[in-house]
Image: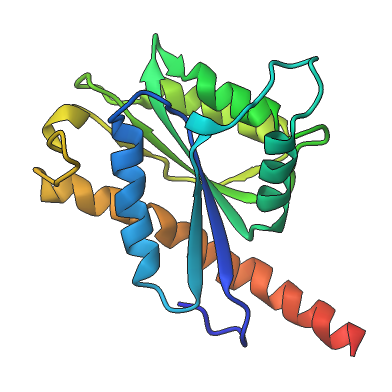
């Protein structure tokens, strides 16, 4: 997918769940598998489970600063969240709140992935997440992926039970890589030429 010189497209996925055995992590494992099949692309998943991310107003932690550096260096970002009580998770909000002001998401192409146990999927969570990500300046790509009845998609060990839904999840990084190839890589090449 990457035909722009030697630049590896670096994606980062921010995981919005810390529950043991969570389905957001299982979905991101499929995303990582898909990115791994794309030459010239790499993915880092930030799992906040073991990070110290302070509440807003408490200052930045070392973990928050490191997360900011990773997101700032990325070419594209995936925000992945479960739907809780008709919105995205408080974990995802805490992650976004710890990306600084102005946010390290500003100007970044962002793809959205939501998972839910219910039959209508994570539509409300993704609507709210789109609004917040856009508010902090992210370039939210169209076509968020909402996974309904997520407990029927994976078993407890993360094995896929529903190949059609798994294919949708694996497709999440595709649009992001396409956008980066079309819009970000040419700009990087131009900047490199100017520096020479």
- Please count the marks in the image: 0
* Residue 173 vertical position relative to residue 68 in the rendered view, above or below: below
The spot of residue 194 in percent (x, y) is: 89, 84
Q: Nearer the viewer, residue 120 or 41?
A: 41
Horizontal placement of 179 versus 81: left or right? right
- Visible residue check, residue 105: no
Q: Residue at x 54, y 58 (%)?
A: 11
- Among all residues in the image, which is located at the extreme top? 85
In the picture, residue 54 is in which quadrant? top right
Q: Residue at x 72, y 33 (%)?
A: 136
The spot of residue 122 in percent (x, y) is: 35, 25
* Residue 109 vertical position relative to residue 137 in the rendered view, above or below: below
Q: Quadrant of the N terminus?
A: bottom left
* Residue 157 vertical position relative to residue 186 in the rendered view, above or below: above
- Visible residue check, residue 150: yes
The spot of residue 39 in percent (x, y) is: 43, 78
The spot of residue 186 in percent (x, y) is: 69, 77
Q: Residue at x 19, y 45 (%)?
A: 165
* Residue 19 vertical position relative to residue 38 in the rendered view, above or below: above
Horizontal placement of 141 versus 55: left or right? left
Looking at the picture, the colour scheme in use is rainbow
Horizontal placement of 37 versus 129: left or right? left
- Among all residues in the image, which is located at the extreme left? 161
- Among all residues in the image, which is located at the extreme bottom? 196
Q: Quadrant of the C terminus?
A: bottom right
């Amino acid at each position: 997918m990457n035909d722009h010189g030697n630049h590896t497209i670096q994606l980062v996925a921010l995981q919005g769940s810390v529950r043991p055995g969570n389905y957001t992590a299982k979905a991101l494992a499929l995303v990582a598998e898909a990115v791994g099949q794309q030459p010239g692309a790499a993915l880092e998943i930030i799992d906040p489970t073991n990070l110290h991310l302070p509440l807003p107003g408490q200052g930045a932690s070392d973990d928050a600063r490191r997360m900011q550096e990773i997101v700032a260096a990325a070419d594209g970002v995936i925000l992945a969240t479960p739907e809780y009580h008709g919105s995205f998770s408080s974990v995802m909000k805490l992650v976004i709140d710890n990306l600084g002001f102005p946010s390290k998401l500003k100007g970044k192409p962002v793809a959205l992935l939501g998972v839910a146990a219910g039959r209508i999927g994570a539509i409300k969570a993704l609507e709210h997440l789109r609004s917040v990500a856009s508010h902090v300046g992210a370039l939210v790509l169209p076509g968020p992926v909402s996974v309904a009845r997520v407990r029927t998609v994976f078993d407890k060990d993360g094995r896929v039970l529903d190949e059609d839904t798994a294919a949708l999840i694996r497709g999440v990084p595709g649009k992001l890589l396409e956008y980066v190839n079309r819009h970000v890589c040419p700009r990087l090449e131009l900047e490199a030429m100017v520096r020479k």
